[in-house]
Image: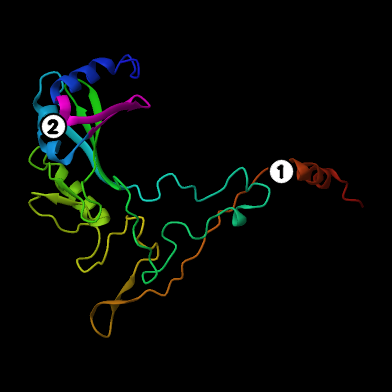
């Protein structure tokens, strides 16, 4: 238990006793407990965390999807680029900088997608984060926990819409952020930043129309303003110089 803070040690012990071998891994990051649970044990584990005395996680604060494609790949150089400029420090072929026709094939990486849930016990003032990795990346499926916490309804719809994660057993799994005719899932790392179509209202036709996007993939270079000591003296000299008469 030395890997956990003193405050979290009783909670870790209680969670392990309650879930047993349903926990794939449990760790602490910045004093936040993170427990990994397999899809097959997802619903039962959530119910146990909600109903077990001493835990009683009665509130689901948040649920979101995650795409780990390209995770850990640095897109920007920082210290190395400070002398040459950020325009030469960016990887212009980074995530999303491609059009729909030339979008890359998604890499076959283990645990590409994840569902992350933040839980709160209002009675015991406890918090825990759950993470569930779908078994298949090409069709990520996780059981719905709407029957455990009704607040998961719209959150699961959002994760389905933006990441394409299917929540099996959801009572009304449909898009919630994008249009009904939208193609793809915009928060996936292999989805182009410029999208695939342009949507606008056509006054002549009296309806919304879809057209090929005219935006070109481009690199946006941040402008960084620094106080450079090499020029501070010159500016001071200019301000203090006599104007003459």
Task: Name the side, left or right, on which 6 lies relative to 166.
Answer: right
Task: Name the side, left or right, on which 115 lies relative to 148.
Answer: right
Closest to the observer: 139 or 50?
Answer: 139
Q: Is residue 129 magenta?
A: no
Residue 96 coordinates in the image, percent (x, y): 41, 60
Residue under pointer 2: 45
Label 2 near label 1: C-beta < 8 Å? Answer: no
Label 1: which secondary element: loop
Closest to the observer: 195 or 25?
Answer: 25
What's the image's color scheme? rainbow
Residue under pointer 1: 228
What residue sits 50% from the left and 65% below the top?
Answer: 218
Magenta stretch: helix, strand or loop mostly: strand
Placement of 59 over or under 237, stated as above or below: above
Question: Quadrant location of residue 51?
Answer: top left
Label 2: which secondary element: helix
Distance, label 1 to label 2, CA atoms, is 56 Å
Question: Quadrant location of residue 227?
Answer: top right
What residue sits 18% from the left and 38% below the top?
Answer: 38
Query: Which range of residues does the magenta coloring cover?
Result: 20-36
């Amino acid at each position: 238990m030395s890997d956990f803070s003193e405050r979290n040690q009783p909670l870790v012990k209680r969670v392990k006793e309650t879930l047993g071998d349903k926990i794939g891994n449990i760790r602490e990051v910045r004093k936040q407990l993170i427990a990994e649970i397999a899809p097959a044990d997802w619903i039962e584990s959530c119910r146990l965390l909600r109903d077990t005395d001493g835990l009683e996680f009665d509130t689901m604060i948040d649920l979101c999807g995650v795409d780990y494609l390209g995770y850990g790949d640095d897109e920007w150089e920082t210290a190395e680029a400070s002398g040459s400029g950020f325009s030469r420090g960016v990887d212009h072929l980074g995530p999303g900088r491609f059009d729909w026709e030339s979008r890359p094939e998604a890499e076959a990486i283990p645990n590409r997608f994840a569902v992350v849930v933040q839980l709160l016990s209002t009675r015991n003032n406890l918090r825990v984060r759950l993470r569930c990795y779908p078994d298949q990346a090409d069709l990520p499926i996780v059981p719905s926990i709407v029957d455990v916490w009704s607040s998961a309804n719209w959150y699961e719809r959002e994760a389905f819409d933006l990441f394409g994660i299917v929540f099996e057993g959801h009572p009304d799994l449909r898009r919630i952020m994008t249009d009904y005719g939208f193609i793809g899932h915009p928060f996936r790392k292999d989805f182009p930043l410029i999208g695939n179509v342009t949507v606008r209202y056509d006054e002549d036709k009296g309806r919304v129309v879809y057209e090929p996007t005219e935006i070109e993939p481009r690199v946006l270079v941040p402008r960084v303003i620094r106080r450079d000591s090499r020029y501070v003296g010159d500016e001071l000299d200019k301000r203090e110089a006599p104007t003459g008469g």
